[in-house]
Amino acid sequence: MTTMTMVKALNEGLRRVLEVQPKSLVMGEDVGRLGGVFRVTDGLQKDFGSERIIDTPLAESGIIGTAIGLAMRGYRPICEIQFDGFVYPAFDQLVSQLAKIPNRSGGRVRLPVVVRIPYGGGIGAIEHHSESPEAYFAHTAGLKVVTCANPNDAYWMIQQAAAGDDPVIFFEPKRRYQAKGEVDTETSELDLYRARTLREGRTATLIAYGPTVDVAANAAAAAAEEGLDLEVIDLRALSPIDWDPLFASVRKTGRAVVVHEAPGNIGVGAEVAARVSEECFYSLESPVLRVTGYDVPYPASRLEDDYLPNLDRVLDAVDRSLEY
Amino acid sequence: MGDTQRPAKKTAKSRPKPASTNEPAFVQLLTPEGQRVKHPDYELDLTDDEYRGLYRDLVITRELDAQGTALQRQGQLGLWPSLLGQEAAQVGSGRALAPQDTVFPAYRELGVQWARGVDLISSFALFRGTDLGGRDVAADRFNMYAIVIASQTLHAAGYAMGIAMDGAVGNEDGEAVVVYHGDGATSEGDFNEALIWAGVFNSPLVLFCQNNQYAISETNARQFRLPPYRRAEGFGVPGILVDGNDVLATYAVTKAAADRARRGEGPSLVEAYTYRMQPHTTSDDATRYRDAAELDFWRAKDPIVRYRKWLDAEGLADEAYFASIDTEAGELVRELRARVMALTDPEVAEMFDNVYAETPQEITAQRAEALEFQASLDDDHEGSDAR
């Protein structure tokens, strides 16, 4: 066990990937000399060279499009999109090319490309630097979408994503980048596409991922002081979602609250609510509730505390669920 | 609000002369009249068999393409994008490549596919809707068709980067990548990003622009103020304009660009100035945006007519040879037609296959659900038959 920040855990994870997989590459804007604007790739170019840690031109479609070509040539690119709000210029290359080429080829072409995207708010940033675009990609067949919530997961999930042969959109909660945690560098605890129950309880199930896992965990701790016994599940994978532990939990508690930063409308929480309703209908004591960002553009940063789901909003939803 | 003055309707006569009938200065080795001409930078010295082979490719490509249009008209294909008029651009460039080179096509490159010796059936399956055009692209060194305009230019740029990283450039045995695109593609961001990438990474890439004068209905005037071959220079990439209806010129220019790439000297852009004699696809009505005079202008520049004249005048081929090619093309058309008609609908289950390398449980479950539902309908159907 070693204590490290999420940034360091990602850096160490990438280092392991580059060591064991000679075809792996890191590419993106400022990932080389600078080490990335968040320093996730710090020192990698020095150790692995500028042919494997590639500072690219400033063009997101170009980053993903050429990564696809490199993958066709046998390379295994790990791309960095500098910020969530900058991924959209690459939208066609992600959803129509990266996602579909393996299928169009009848499985003859595999594109083992990982796309790392720092996402979410809570850092007081200027516009386009605090968004949560995960639903666009989770909606796209052919892509897998995951997100880490702590340094240990960051360390292992980036390695697992890079080891598979499917394209993976890898969301990193940037407001958790500097949070420290224990990392077990010897053994991985879970497969990439498994959800984790981080707190067991019987009163209600809180379902979160990425930056809101910590929010949900804190809410559960606060609720415990009031005698409420909340279960907390970290989805980890948004596509595919690991449904079985989720359904088992709701069948036990009868109540569910989904928490994410992205707007609620047609979001991951909506899918969770729909599926839980279909599968756990007779166990439900109340409708599945969502605590999410509002259906508005991400606000000016001085308002973000009012936009983002926080402990009070989560506990309020739990109360509403219990009172139903 | 007063009546707005509507401008007088322009007649075909009063319409300004289309840009496409202005002859630019391009590399030409064979005039439309079939006269061999010299160029200071490009020469071509093929064997007699190779010269005859180019004629064979041109004719066969034209006939197989015409069969695509015919099959669409007969309801056997959903759509067909004809290459009529662009045979020389495709055959010359395709034949100029070395076996180790890799092609990224757009979606009208039947002639390149033929010239590269790649089975054509995948392109017909794509337009018949029996599959999505998948092939063993690694073995063929010819990628799948790309429908989203210019998307393939970036894939080619990345692939070419990989070649350089593999150290597979630097001498005559090096690998080159040729990506095909049209004049419309030059307006897309991806095309411009591909030029940036190929330039700054000095990749072994040839961008082969078939400027067939039209992006569906829009002329060059709506795509650029500076033609693509001149714009390339702005990216630090040499641009060459070639007579796209001259198979000898497209061969010579492409070979020089590919040789340059494989020697490790970097990317180039070849603009083949040609003309799409058919509508954009079988779904398009080109009479809405161009007139017969323009077609006549380009018909006089036909790539096959001029080449045949030259072969004949040089004594490289005679009437018996030309007739034998027509016969062979006819046989190939019949064979292809039979194969296209034999392409059957895929099984329902196939849509669930190969979405991922590791299939999620959800998709496996949906696959089973769809099959079960289909089977239940079949059971109902059999039941009603029994009654």
Image (cartoon, rainbow, N blue to C red):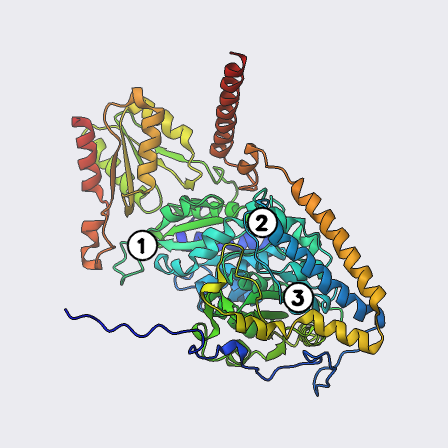
Front tag of 1 and 2:
2
The residue pinned by badge 1 equals A131
Query: Which one is in front, A266 or A117?
Result: A266
Q: Which mark is residue B351?
A: none
**In the image, are marks 3 and 1 on the same chain?**
no
Q: Amino acid at mark 3?
A: Glu
Position of B212 with respect to B89 (left or right) is left
- In primary-sequence order, the first of circles 2 and 3 is 2
Q: Residue at x 69, y 60 (%)?
A: B61
Circle 2: element type: helix
| A210 over B344 or under it: above or below | below
Q: Quadrant of residue A231?
A: top left
Q: Residue at x 60, y 65 (%)?
A: B179
Q: Residues within 10 Å of mark 3 (few under 14, many from 20)?
A: many
Position of A127 with respect to B154 (left or right) is left
The residue pinned by badge 2 equals B72
The residue pinned by badge 3 equals B87
Q: Chain of mark 2?
A: B
